[in-house]
Amino acid sequence: MQLSEIATLCGATHRLNPAIAETVPTGFAIDSRAVKPGEVFVAIPGERVDGHQFVAEVLDQGALAALVVHHRLPFAKTLAPYTDRLLFVTDTACAFQQMAQKILTAWNKPIVAVTGSAGKTTMKDLTAHVLEGVTSKGFKSLGNLNTSYGLPLTVGRMISAGADPRDFDLAVLEFGMSSYGEIKRLTEIAPPTAAIVGNVGTAHIEFFGNSDGIAEAKAEIVDGLQPGGLAILNADDPRVSKMRERRSDISILTFGIDADADVRAVSINNDTLGATSFELRTPRGDVSVNLPLLGKHNVYNALAAAAAGHHFGMSARQIARQLKTAAPSKMRGELIKFANGVTVIDDSYNSNPPALIQAVQAMANAKGFVRRIVVAGEMLELGEQGASLHRSCGQQIADAGIQRVIGVRGLSRYLVAGAMDAGVRDSTFCETPEQAAEQLLGELQAGDLVLVKGSRGVRTERVVERLKAALGGNEQ
């Protein structure tokens, strides 16, 4: 889509020269540090930094244009050479969201929205992968672009770098939130025809007080379904299952392991690391599934994806075939086998108490390892319950039979204390991921299985990066 057409979608005024007006952007960006040549930079006023401060810089480095608010532009004289590359609006965030909303409204194809307190990115990726069985023209969120800024960035891929909305038959989009009203806004931008709610846990509990508050915020995705839409709900999570009562004008499809769900897994076997087998039961029949992902939590992710596949007319056999070729999302359960006999589960992208314990249980079930080590970074946004939740996780890690615990930063010292109190005497606390990596390198031996997990802000991926650098080549 040409820049002049994008300006119209955003409601922007401009003085674009004809050549620039007719140019198709290569993409969109809101982080000035990550802008690539040919992209449109959306200057967002943040809590600490205003993107308008970097408009001249990104344009000088090759950005095609910038979406801006006039009165926020500093040093206006320095922008004189760029007046033909500025799109003026009254609110950049709202204009960017308006653009995405108009694109999707005109597109008018099925939208599957995915949310949950833990594992929603993997659930989204698995759902998109399964639905490749019914269309080769699917579209999905990349990574975890799931906010009111991330969603427009995702939708922007439909109209940039030569893409056209007509290239796609359906979209699988991830919806995230950290406060009330965020998911509601996302459903206004991208009204789903089907919505998956994976679980309700303690992520972001600092902002809600308790899990009931989190459930209410997550339920906004059900409230925002298009009339006649479908809610795909986890029957094993009472707070999620209760969401079926919110609407009488939609259909409900449930998935689960323990409950009597529409789509269900039985006879689960996850003794082998990185591989889980189970019997999938669907309204169209039963089939054996070999899922190349570890842990019971990924069975739930697979069931949600299977439910979506069923909704779009797939047979149980078709669903099983797609699940068999799935792969873990980056830094979300990736398996790394080093030549020295050490195996690492890289689950370092993010963490919260339920997700941490799920990953620990998965490694505890895996056979064939001499020692199991958990590197657990601090879990953020837990509010007043932070210390007690960390301590409880430490106790549960010990109960799972883990032999070594390394806590990284802040409140993880309470996790270490909880593990030690529960019997894991070989537990230590490190201030940084770099310290944790050096400690590991001094003690790792063949037969060790290491789980690395922590909240995004703790950067526990640096532990994995350091191990890769020190231990040389590895095979996935």
Image (spheres, rainbow, N blue to C red):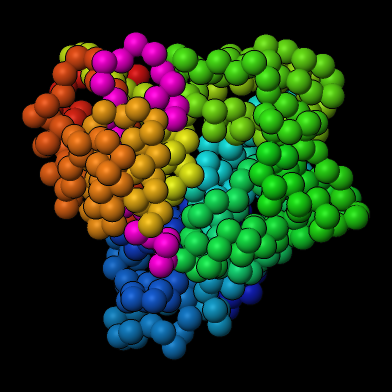
Residue 207 appears at what percent x and percent y? Answer: 50, 68
State the image quarter where residue 7 is shown: bottom right
State the image quarter where residue 472 is shown: top left
Name the residue located 25 percent from the left edge and 58 percent from the top edge. 410
Reply above or below: 375 against 10.
above
> Magenta stretch containing residue 31, yes or no?
no
Does the image show residue 160?
no
Name the residue located 32 percent from the left edge and 71 percent from the top edge. 54
Quarter of the image containing the C terminus? top left
Does the image show residue 180?
yes
> As drawn, is 5 to the left or to the right of 364?
right
Residue 336 appears at what percent x and percent y? Answer: 31, 23
Q: Nearer the viewer, residue 278 or 236?
A: 236
Q: Nearer the viewer, residue 266 or 433?
A: 266
Q: Nearer the viewer, residue 59 or 265?
A: 265
Residue 55 appears at what percent x and percent y? Answer: 35, 72
Name the residue located 35 percent from the left edge and 27 percent from the top edge. 401
> As drawn, is 150 to the left or to the right of 323?
left
Reply above or below: 234 against 271.
below
Reply above or below: 227 against 90.
above
Name the residue located 87 percent from the left edge and 45 percent from the top edge. 251
> Magenta stretch containing residue 378, yes or no?
yes
The boundaries of the magenta stretch are 361-387
Badge count: 0
> As drawn, is 71 to the left or to the right of 120?
left
Q: Nearer the viewer, residue 91 or 256?
A: 256
Which residue in the rendered view is the most extreme toward the left? 442
Which residue in the rendered view is the most extreme toward the bottom? 71
Residue 255 appears at what percent x and percent y? Answer: 72, 34
Reply above or below: 72 against 347.
below
